[in-house]
Image: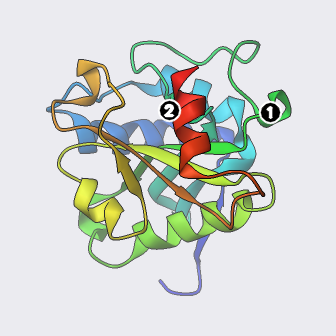
Amino acid sequence: MGRDIRIRHIARGDWPRIAALEQEAYADSTLLEGREALESRGRVSPATCFVLDLGGRIGGYVLALPYPMFRYPDLALREQAASAPSAPSGTRNLHLHDIVVARELRGRGWGGRLLDRLTAQARPAYDRISLVAVAGMAAFWAARGFRPYEDVRLPRDYGGDAVYMSRAFKVDRPGRTEEADRTARAR
């Protein structure tokens, strides 16, 4: 299995399996979005969306798209390309919307490898990465350098224990501090 494993950009034919992995991961929660919503997020930023390809079998995925700090996708809506936040509009924040590894492959470091690939791809264009930690995963993300912003209000769809989190990819540009982040959030 080792030689045929790779992390690659999402291809059109991958979406049925991505939707099946999402169904498996979130079937008993309000986090289930469905294929159309997932595809809409992938269309906004195909360069920051990947699959774990195990010799032709999709074993995981990561979807990330540009969003201003302290904002996040509405789980009930599809992304609209014309209105979706994007890097050219000025945001230097990439929002990691979803990362899923097939149940039988968990605990082998594949999620970390997907995150590493995303970080390497995004680092030149973005300063920060944000996410909404769900299902009690805030400690997992904190161990990977993500800082919680517990005062950011999240919709119920994300779950009662959801926490908005962020970390810098690299040293922020001069003048970008946590104080600047708080000021941006207040706008």
Where is residue 107? Give x, y as percent: 26, 75
Where is residue 175? Give x, y as percent: 74, 52
Q: Secondary structure at mark 2?
A: loop
Taking the spot 62% from the left edge, 32% from the top edge, the residue there is 68
The front one of 90 and 109 is 90
Distance from Cα at disc 2 to Cα at disc 1: 14 Å
Viewed as shown, does residue 37 lie left or right of 43?
Answer: left
Q: Secondary structure at mark 1?
A: loop
The front one of 77 and 57 is 77
Which label sits on residue 70? 2
Which label sits on residue 36? none
The front one of 69 and 26 is 69
Q: Is residue 54 visible?
A: no
Taking the spot 43% from the left edge, 67% from the top edge, the residue there is 145
Evaluate if marks 2 and 1 touch, with contact meaning CB atoms under 8 Å apart: no
Compared with 22, 122 (above or below) is below
Taking the spot 24% from the left edge, 54% from the top edge, the residue there is 137
Determine which quarter of the picture holds residue 155: top left
- Type of residue at label 2? Phe
Where is residue 149? Give x, y as percent: 36, 42
Query: Residue beneath label 1, please?
Result: 90
Where is residue 73? Give x, y as percent: 49, 25
Colouring style: rainbow
The quadrant of the rendering that contains the C terminus is top right
Compared with 84, 9 (above or below) is below
- Type of residue at label 1? Gly
Determine which quarter of the picture holds residue 24: top left
